[in-house]
Image (cartoon, grey):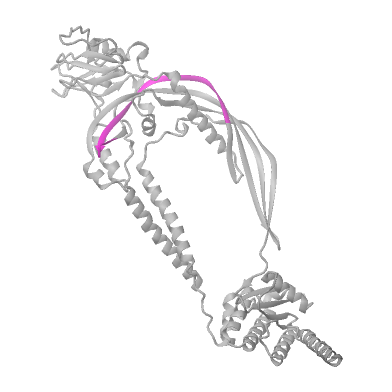
Amino acid sequence: MSTILEQKCPCCGGAVEFDVGVQRLKCPYCDTEFDITAMPEDTANQVEQVNWNSQGSQWGAGETDGMNVYACNSCGGEIVADSTTGATACPYCGNQVVMKGQFSGALKPDLVIPFKLDKKAAKEALKKHISTKKFVPKSFLSDNRLEEIKGVYVPHWLFTCDAVGNANYKAKKVRKWSDENYNYTETSYFDVYRSGNIGFDNIPVDGSTKMPDDLMESVEPFDLSQAVDFNTAYLAGYLADKYDVTAEDSMPRANERIRQSIDDAFKETVKGYDDVESQSVSMNVANGIYKYALYPVWLLNTSWNGEKFTFAMNGQTGKFVGNIPTDKKAVTKASLLLGAGIGAVIYGLMWLIELL
Amino acid sequence: MKKLLSIALVLFICLSSIISASAFTYQHVIDYADKLASSELEELDAVAGNLENTYGIAVLFCITEGTGDVTADEFASGTYYEYTDNENGLIIVHDDWNKTYSVFVSGSAGEALTDAAVDSMTDAYDLNESYYDGIYACYELAEEYLENGYSGGYVDKTETETVFAETTGEVKEKDGVAFFWLPVSLVIGLLVGFLIINAIASKNKSVRMQENATVYTRPGSMAITGGADNFLYKNLDRTEKPKQTQKK
């Protein structure tokens, strides 16, 4: 058994949760509010070593690989979680618990951005997201069922560096003129080179294999100016994972984005040409540092026709993303109708021009 | 037998001289298709001759049935230079077999007898049932256009149509848009429609990796420290402008 940590109300003993409205801890039973700082982790939170012996069958060798077993401090129920789970709820009493060992020592996040938007806002955003899209199957609108909604603190690595880059471009200029007998087109080709440096602050890379990388990058950006020093109290009421992708393994993705940014930024300085094409970009990173942070994300799972759909909302800014199925028949029908209309207009305009 | 041979030889020489004489005499109207009587040829040639004397522009009309091994344009230019050495002029060749027109314009003739003017002339030719009347109407219009052109007015499409209506008493019918363009328009429309609808439908997919980290660039941190723009080479493409117009 591992250690778990609960945020208990000093007044009634109920499990407190982080309230996004007041940005403080709040007891859902007696409505008492507490400052995060008023509940220091080592003193206010009860940390217990739980050593229950199972009376049932024992886990076989290797069966518990990749998972941890915890005991709920409130009801004694057994909480089985995978090795990366950092905060969850007891499946028996719903009590919110934080797996202390997942965020201690070297695993302690440097920063956390607290949730600013609650579950209600996430539900409304989902409704708005679906209703504003076109060519959504009608049955998806009526039969789509929200199966699960959860607020998750997703581990991210934040990379800060000064990048020095060199980029080569192939550019061309086109000049056209004509005389009495001929039309001329002169195309001049140039090799363009640029070097320079750009600073980047806190480029996030998803540190959890459980979260789809494209989903996490789609809800960017987060406003890191609102981040605070990590405190387990912020996790109360939410799920949280510890990273299972190391900073070293996340660096290639950060480098890839930096390289593309250098390419885009330097390309902007290549002016006076009719076409500019990237040939190569090389870069060196200096003063590179990284931080470990937890970002707030609402995850919403829905199902339709036996298929699962996952949506995500930035728990700080409200940016909502998620792929929605497209009614292919409706798309084909609309394409044909619009195409026929445009075709008729083109033909009509040709007649009009001819008659005038 | 000798008598018969000598009579045949005399007849051949006489016929040859008549043919060459007619080709030599009627320099402005060339009738390879034998559609005009000699008197008609003489009369029309006289009208064209007057035009050339007055305005200095040679206006030739040729009726043929096919252009042999050469293209219609080559046939028109070859016939023009065969019958006149006037550098300013034009020839309208009507291929009576294929029902097509080809036009060759030389020198300053195009300033007064513009494409629109030549269009009207061939339309006037088509309106008349007889070849003689058609060519005559054609020359009447040519005179109007040349006079207009020499008085300083540029003969544009609208003006040529007005002159056409005044001279022939006919209102030029609009050609309209060929039916061929209807499926072409529909294909273009469908392509555009498909692109628009798919662009709208693609908004249903909002999950994608970020391309860059531009949003995380430190404000004011970018500095270009070196750069060069080196010329490599250049290509020159030359395409000939279309000069002659083939008319139906």
Magenta part mainly helix, strand or loop?
strand
Choose top left, top right, bottom left or bottom right for residue B145: bottom right
Choose top left, top right, bottom left or bottom right for residue B52: bottom right
Q: Is residue B59 left or right of residue A19?
A: right
Residue B117 included in the magenta stretch of the image: no
Residue B84 position in % (x across, y down): 77, 78
Vertical relation: A251 (above or below) A281: above
* Residue nearest the observer in this picture, A207 or B58: B58
Residue B72 position in % (x across, y down): 67, 71
What residue is shown at x 25% (from left), y 40% (from top)? Answer: A305
* Residue nearest the observer in this picture, A11 or B120: B120
Residue A252 position in % (x across, y down): 48, 24
What residue is shown at x 46% (from left), y 26% (from top)? Answer: A253
Residue A36 visible, this orientation: no
Q: Is residue A198 left or right of residue B135?
A: left
Q: Which residues are magenta?
A: A281-308
* Residue nearest the observer in this picture, A100 or B240: B240
Disc tally is: 0
Residue A8 position in % (x across, y down): 18, 16
